[in-house]
Amino acid sequence: MKITKVLNNNVVMSKDESNQEIVVMGKGLAFQKKTGDAIESSKVEKTFVLENSNVAKKLAELMKETSEIYLDLSYKILELAKSQLTYKLDNYLYVALTDHLSFAITRHKNGIDLKNPLLWEIRRYYKQEFQIALKALDMVEEDTGVRLVEDEAASIALHLVNSQLSGENMDTAIKVTELVNNILNIVRYYFKIELDEDSINY
């Protein structure tokens, strides 16, 4: 394998045997290396296959300003999600989640924790994704020492849901969640009943 682009000392772009773009990570992998140099296989720790060249470009831009620790975290979170979810995750999720984690952790260190107004709805409607996202918060704490608030789990869960929608805008997942919540509220008020959230009818 040869380097097609150096993103930082530990992350490079390359191509695999089938000419597909990949991101290769490893400590000191690109130190004093340039485009065209061979990648030392002994230093390779992780490889990300990027099916979409647009994703590769955006990831390359992101890695210029973002620590690879966030890409590593995204990789671990997505591997967990892939092992538990039945649907295929869109490749762009690597970029979206890396970017999100970077900003969320930076904000938290500056004493800013954003509230997610859809926390309860996401917890209720996307239970599996929310549980994965809670485990993701544990991973973040383990790797960075930062404990993000539960609202961030809701945001991570929404990224997983959005990825299921084949890379559509995050607004789609939010609108669907709000729509379902509004419909349930109409049913509650019209019939003056409380709904059993664990029932099949619900």
Image (spheres, rainbow, N blue to C red):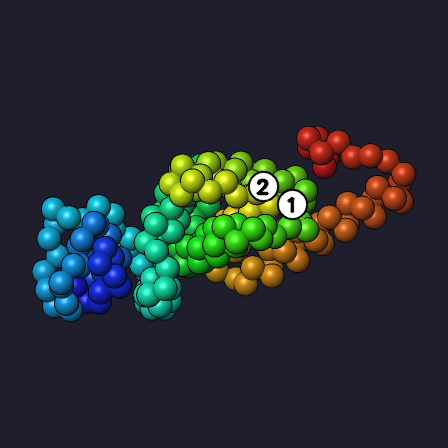
Q: Residues within 10 Å of mark 1 (few under 14, many from 20)?
A: some
- From what the image shows, is residue 11 above or below residue 156? below
State which tag comes first along the sequence, 2 or 1. Answer: 1
> In the image, residue 133 lies at what x, y percent?
51, 41
- From what the image shows, is residue 103 above or below residue 190? below
Number of labels in the image equals: 2
Comparing labels 2 and 1, the label whose residue is closer to the camera: 2
x 58%, y 53%: residue: 112
Q: Amino acid at mark 2?
A: Glu
x 89%, y 45%: residue: 190
Q: Where residue 9 is drawn, which disc sits there? A: none
Provide the residue designation for mark 1: 119
In which quadrant of the rendered view does residue 9 lie? bottom left
Provide the residue designation for mark 2: 150
Q: Tell me if I can see residue 150 in this picture.
A: yes
- From what the image shows, is residue 50 above or below residue 126? below
